[in-house]
Image (spheres, rainbow, N blue to C red):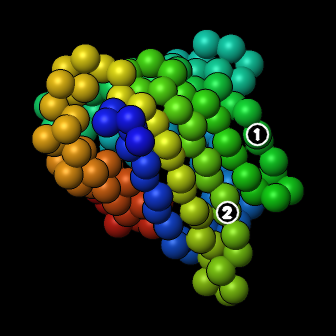
Amino acid sequence: MNPHDIRFTGRWKTRLPPDAMYAKLADIGGYPAWWPNFSSVRHTGERECEFVISSVLPYALTVRLTAVVEDPIERILEATLDGDIMGSVRWAVEPDGPHGCVAQFTEHVVVRKAALRRWMPLARPLFRINHSLAMRAGHRALNGLGA
């Protein structure tokens, strides 16, 4: 594994119906309205946007996302990422009985931002915690609990 690679996985349970959850995740332009870590989203093409993610740690990432799979029937979203990080992200939304749904998240990226690459070997655990806090903020916002 490259010393600048990092993989993240997660699972969000929510009361939203699966189709509503898929629609919320597919609407990246709407992320800043509910996900506190998304500072901005700017559409740059039909299936492409650039966004800025802020974090607990003193840095922000600028990333271009290009949609690869948008399947509302199977409720799968996949995209490539390029910019301060490069790689891929995937969401898969499944029903959770009468309780809403579960959204599985996977991300595999290579850190490209020079300031972060310098610290990656030592700060990997901090980057994981930072990512976890950002994901928790999004999950809590979706569940109406605030950040």
Amino acid at the residue labelled 2:
Val
- Residue 22, located in which quarter of the rendered image? bottom right
Q: Earlier in the sequence, mark 1 or mark 2?
A: 1
Left or right: where 47 falls relative to 107: right
Instruction: From the top left corner, tell me how far across and down residue 48 is, in percent.
Output: 65, 21
Pointers 1 and 2 in contact (C-beta within 8 Å): no
Q: Is residue 70 above or below residue 117?
A: below
Which element type, helix, strand or loop, lies under badge 2? strand
Label 1: how many Cα within 10 Å (few below 14, some 14–19, many 20+):
some
- Residue pictured at 18% horizontal, 25% vertical: 118
Who's the residue at 25% across and 26% down the image? 117
**Whole-percent x, y for residue 30 in the image:** 54, 37
Seen at 37% across and 63% down, the residue is 140
- Residue 40 visible in the picture: no
Give the left or right position of residue 138, taking residue 29 as reference: left
Left/right placement of residue 75 relative to residue 144 reads right
Q: Is residue 104 in view?
A: yes
Please identify, in this view, whether the residue under mark 1 or under mark 2 is nearer the observer: 1
Seen from the viewer's position, the closer of residues 104 and 147 is: 104
Task: Estimate the x, y position of residue 11 in percent, counting from the top left.
Answer: 50, 67
Residue 93 position by quadrant: bottom right
Location of the N terminus by quadrant is: top left
Q: Residues within 10 Å of mark 2 (few under 14, many from 20)?
A: many
How many angstroms separate mark 1 from mark 2 (CA)?
A: 13 Å
On residue 93, the disc is 2
**Is disc 1 placed on a helix, strand or loop?**
strand
Please state the horizontal and vertical placement of residue 10, each as a whole percent of the image: 46, 62
Looking at the image, which is closer to me, 36 or 89? 89
Q: What amino acid is labelled 1 in the image?
A: Val
The residue indicated by pointer 1 is: 69
